[in-house]
Amino acid sequence: METKTRLRQSFGEASKKRVGIFSLTCDEGCSIMLTEIFNRKLIPWLEKMELVYFLSIKDKVEIKDLDIALVEGVVTSERDKEDIEKIRANTKILIAMGTCAMTALPSGQRNNFNINQLKEIEGHLEKYNFLPKALALKDAVKVDDNISGCPIDEEKFVETFEKYL
Amino acid sequence: MHSCNLDVEISKLSKIEGHADLDIKIRDGKLEEVNLKVMENLRFFNQAVKGQSYAAVPQLVSRICGTCSIAHLTGCIEAVEKTLGIEISPQTLLLRKLTVYSMMIRDHALHLYFFAMPDMLGIDSLLDVPREKHNLIHDALAVKEAGNNLSELIAGRAVHAPFEQVGGFSHEIDAAKVPRIIEQLKKIRPTVLKLIDIFAACDWKFERKTNFVALVTDDFSFLEGKIKDSRGDVIEEKDYWDHLHKVVLPYSQATGFEFEGKEYMVGSLARLNLNKNNLHESTKRDAAKYIAKFPSENVYDNNLAQAIEILHSVDHSIELLKNNKFVKEEPAKPEKLSGKNAGAIEAPRGTLYYALEIEEGKVKELKLVIPTAQNLVNMKKDVEEIVRGFCATGIDKAELEKKIIFEVSKLIRAYDPCMSCASHFLRVRWL
């Protein structure tokens, strides 16, 4: 890890924040909204950040040494839980992006289902290792900051994100 | 050499919407199995809508998909209106066309520049383009921005548009902003023509006989008309379901579909193949030599078709914005509160069908057919044929694996699949 940091320093990228954008269970509306915010902001932000992980626009890399992780969606399955724990362990700052990540709704709408609705989905929940309830990020890991909205509010995103850049 | 065993596992395909894995099993140099696994966790929309008010359900299903939320919103609204006998005004129809165009512009641009173009340039991400091609990043952002701003003007936002509602639009169009939006659309026009050039010059080819299906609209506005296929069948929107049949995909949280018992393809390529004569006159004039390429069976021409659809969306939007004055209108009211009906629109990735049963203003049952779910069977068969072709060349194992991963990912990307959408479906007892 140290060698890597030194290498990056020699390429003049050490001062750039390593940013990852992650989607747990959701419609990915917040990251789509983010790509729209990028229309005006990407070029100036690229002076200060390196986009390390964002499956929407680049191939998978190992999740490691992040400065800022922006996470959308809810923690609904065992796999989501493993993913968010891995992200947490490898980032300095973790930001919950959007209402799903902050409150588990709307993507965790099954939490509010009545008995009849639950009956229809219970087989599926079991088969695919869903958790008993869909969780907001803060109920699974420590969260450092939040950006509300469904999808994220542009002004709030810019304000919050730039604090950490 | 010819008898290698190989398991290719592509986990988390990138540069598509949502999560999917692909497993390919080769035994004794022969393809044994392809499993396309949609790894999105279900969010159970079919259940969540039950008992909800007809007016609230469109915003709820908008959350099925971030990138084509406007398609779900519009498709669901249309089905509600058909079910409850709501007659919308001519102005509402115009505004809806503009809303759908705004989505097509930014959604297709995202796919073409950020998902498909890196494969052509031999890079991982558009952000990695060499400095001399940096204008492509600026082009991408400018085209998306024009679509995004059109969404904001007409529907309030590009994602989960707040103004579009059952019966009409809740907000008046800010007339003062219209000239700037027209200017912006005119400004990106040459950029879009350049984009068409880029994809027309692409020599990728994969052809396999299949059927194409699309809603054929008189003015190519994605909203009304009849569903047609390459064989000449014509179907009313509401009857579409009767011609489909669900296919279970093992290990996958999604269901596939067949049309008349066979695989088929929906999306831009299908629309250009079936309806190119109805493109806007300016589009037909300036992209004539590329439009002449259709009908095409080359899956990669789906990219070219998307680029042409961006131009059409820009051209028709400019015309609609120029020639219409928009006034404040009250939303149209339902004539009844119970019923059962269905409707279809063309979403960016293909035909999107919504069927509803409403009782006393509350949704009793929702059934929908998503574009990507319709393409899954066709996509899987294409992957199988490509892999079989590579196996037959007898290249060594390492080379074979590399080739499969690159070519298969590229082919799947050309479909522009949306796994967030594809995974909404849970098999339920439907009436």
Image (cartoon, coloured by chain):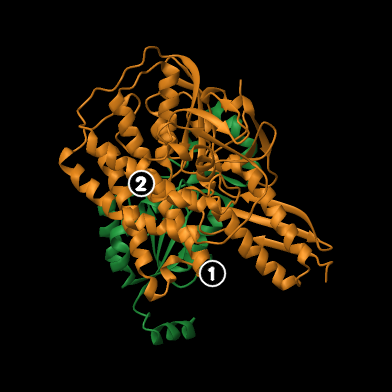
Chain colours: A green, B orange
**Residue B14 pos. (x, y %):** 53, 59
Task: Say which quadrant the N terminus of chain B sits in.
Answer: bottom right
Q: Which residue is mark 1?
A: A62
Please, what is the three-letter code of the amino acid marked with disc 1?
Answer: Glu
**Residue A145 pos. (x, y %):** 34, 58
Q: Does label 1 or label 2 sit earlier along the sequence? A: 1
Judge the density around disc 1: few (<14), some (14-19), many (≥20) Cα neighbours within 10 Å.
Answer: few
Query: Looking at this view, is B209 or B71 the one in front?
Result: B209
Please, what is the three-letter code of the amino acid marked with disc 2?
Answer: Pro
Left-right relation of B350 to B223? right
Label 2 chain ID: A
* Tag 1 secondary structure: loop
Task: Say which quadrant the C terminus of chain B sits in.
Answer: top right
**Residue B327 pos. (x, y %):** 19, 28
- Work out whether disc 1 and disc 2 sit on a shared chain: yes
User: Number of labelled discs?
Assistant: 2
Left-right relation of B335 to B395? left
Residue A147 visible in this rendered orientation of the protein: yes
Query: Looking at this view, is B317 or B106 the one in front?
Result: B317
**Residue A3 pos. (x, y %):** 48, 86
Residue at the (51%, 65%) spot, across then down: B120
Q: Which residue is mark 2?
A: A151
Label 1 chain ID: A
On the image, which quarter does residue B221 sit in?
Answer: top left
Above or below for B394 versus A124: below
